[in-house]
Amino acid sequence: MKTKLLFFFLLFGVLLGYGKTEHFITWQVGVNGPAASLEIQVGDTVTWTWGDAIPHTVSSTAGSTETFSSATLTGAGQTYSRVFNVEGVNNYQCNVHPGSMFGTIIVTTLSTIDYSKLDFSIFPNPSSDKFTIELPRTYNAMTMEVYNVLGKKIVEKQWSGLSNKLTLDATSWSKGVYLVKLKSDNMVQTKKFIKQ
């Protein structure tokens, strides 16, 4: 009986871990924006590895879906790992070097996403003024949201199924990385836009 119970728990543990992925970021001065940003699934792990000998932290910023913070670690090869369990946008930074070390971890749920049905392109990307979002086909109704790197929603538009293109004016936006999120029914897709 004990052998059967042990086998059951081992099998259960393997099944729980199936399909989970570990993602890696080299964490050092100057790593930010796209180099420090990922889109992952609920249950995935992100591991930051120190690439220099300078002290750093990995710390969520205000408004992040999950709250996390490493201790201040010093030395190349140090690591900090985090399993993300909640769908949402997690902006983070190094509290020692917040101006040059920051990124975003977008966590999605595999069961609610169908990338083959809700895909879109952004062009030109990067751009200094206007950019266009284009879908391969029209949808009945859609919500489009744009977030800055601090996780603040700066644009929200309802988009009807009359057109598969939407042009936005980003002239007044600050230079940097933005996240463009489209939602329709139970489908979601997020992509990066870079304002020059």
Image (spheres, rainbow, N blue to C red):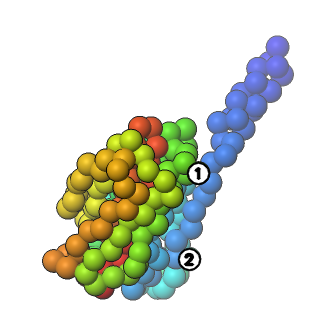
Q: Position of residue 23 (x, y in %)?
A: 57, 62
In the picture, residue 69 is in which quadrant? bottom left
Q: Mark 1–mark 2 contact, CB under 8 Å?
A: no
- Comparing marks 1 and 2, which lies closer to the viewer? 1
Q: Which of 160/100 is in front? A: 160
Measured in 3D between alpha carbons, the distance from the residue under mark 1 to the one under mark 2, in whole angstroms, is 38 Å
The answer to whether residue 102 of the structure is visible from this angle is no
Q: Is residue 169 left or right of residue 104?
A: left
| Quadrant into which the C terminus falls | bottom left
Q: Residue at x 62, y 54 (%)?
A: 21
In the picture, residue 104 is in which quadrant? bottom left
| Quadrant into which the N terminus falls | top right
Q: Secondary structure at mark 1?
A: loop
Q: Earlier in the sequence, mark 1 or mark 2?
A: 2
The kind of residue tagged 1 is Ser
Q: Disc 1 marks which residue?
A: 116
Say above or below: 61 vs 30. above
Q: Position of residue 92 (x, y in %)?
A: 34, 64
Q: Residue at x 33, y 82 (%)?
A: 127
Q: Which of 112/89 is in front? A: 112
Q: Disc 2 marks which residue?
A: 77
Q: Is residue 116 left or right of residue 137?
A: right
The answer to whether residue 4 of the structure is visible from this angle is yes
Q: Is residue 155 left or right of residue 82?
A: left
Q: Residue at x 63, y 48 (%)?
A: 20
The kind of residue tagged 2 is Gly
Q: Residue furthest top?
A: 1
